[in-house]
Amino acid sequence: MIGWWRAVRGAATGPAVTYAAIAVCCAVFLVSPVSGLNPSYGVGDGLLSAQSAYFERWGVIPADLTSGAPNALATPLTALFVHGNWLHLLGNMLFLYVFGAMAEERMGQLEFGLFYAGCGYLALLAYAAANAGSEQTLVGASGAISGVLGAFLYLFPKARVTSLFPFLFFLPLRFPAWAVLIFWFVLQWLAARGAGSGPGVAYLAHLVGFGVGFLYAWGRFRQGTRVKAQAAATEGESQP
């Protein structure tokens, strides 16, 4: 009876954590000065100043975080809900929507929520440690979503996704999820090698998040049964 109730409840709520994370990220972005839709922040230099202050307040500043500043310790969590522009937001939310739902259904809502936040925190912390003297602000859910991708690769090795590649005239082609995710991981690694010594796009956070997610899924579910059915999913070209 208890098992039946849990199954019914899970079917009714669906991947609630994934949907909630998407909703919060979108709501935060829309009311922020970054969206350009909130007239209270003004225009021109006033808007740019408000955006800069917004990122500094809620984003990760490696120099502050590694120095142990008390207020900075929470920023790897708050930064997960802050995005730099529309493309940044939409790309991240697309990947979270596609890969997060199946991962959450496999883990359960509470575990997935903790997993998502943990991957994001560790990914941003690793980036801050590697760029300890930087005062450049880092925002976005990329590290957490990369963790979801890593877990997805382990949990659903036979899943297939539809991808759009610009060099193939954006033709929708279906590939095994493991091939798409490994291709994404290699691109991140190559980009990280060519990014130089200074901070910029947080490729390192992507790599750390992906690795943490994969290792967590391996350690947590290696004794159980992985889903080997060719589950369907859809993926766009943008990456977190």
Image (cartoon, rainbow, N blue to C red):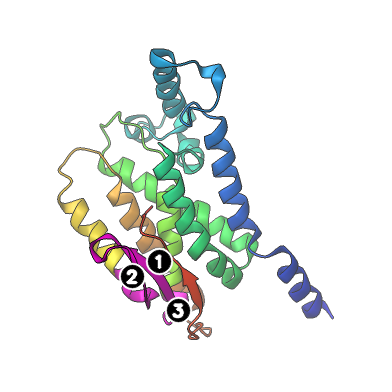
Residue type highlighted by circle 3: Ala
What residue is drawn where x is 32% and y is 40%? 128
Q: Earlier in the sequence, mark 1 or mark 2?
A: 1
Residue 177 point in image, percent of width and height? 39, 74
Number of callouts in the render? 3
Which of labels 1 and 2 is toward the front?
2
Q: Residue 134, which numbered label?
A: none
The residue beneath circle 3 is 159
Which residues, given as a range, are shown in magenta?
A: 154-182
Tell me which numbered mark, 3 or 1, is placed earlier along the sequence: 1
Crowding near the residue tagged with mark 3, few <14, some 14–19, many ≥20 C-alpha atoms within 10 Å: some
Residue bearing the label numbered 1: 150
Image-quadrant location for residue 110: bottom right
Residue 156 on the magenta span? yes
**Position of 215 relative to 20 (above/below):** below
Q: Looking at numbered disc 1 in the image, what kind of residue is underneath it?
A: Gly
Describe residue 102's horizontal placement relative to residue 75 as left or right: right
- At 51% from the left edge and 82% from the top edge, which residue is drawn? 227
Picture coordinates of residue 134, whole percent (x, y): 27, 32
Q: Looking at the image, tell me whether mark 3 or mark 2 is earlier in sequence order.
A: 3
Kindly identify the residue that appears in the image at 45 percent across and 41 percent down: 76
Outermost residue toward the right? 1
Q: Is residue 213 magenta?
A: no
User: In the image, 61: left or right of 89?
Assistant: left
Residue type at mark 2 is Val
Which residue is under mark 2? 180
Give the CA separation, mark 1 to mark 2. Answer: 12 Å
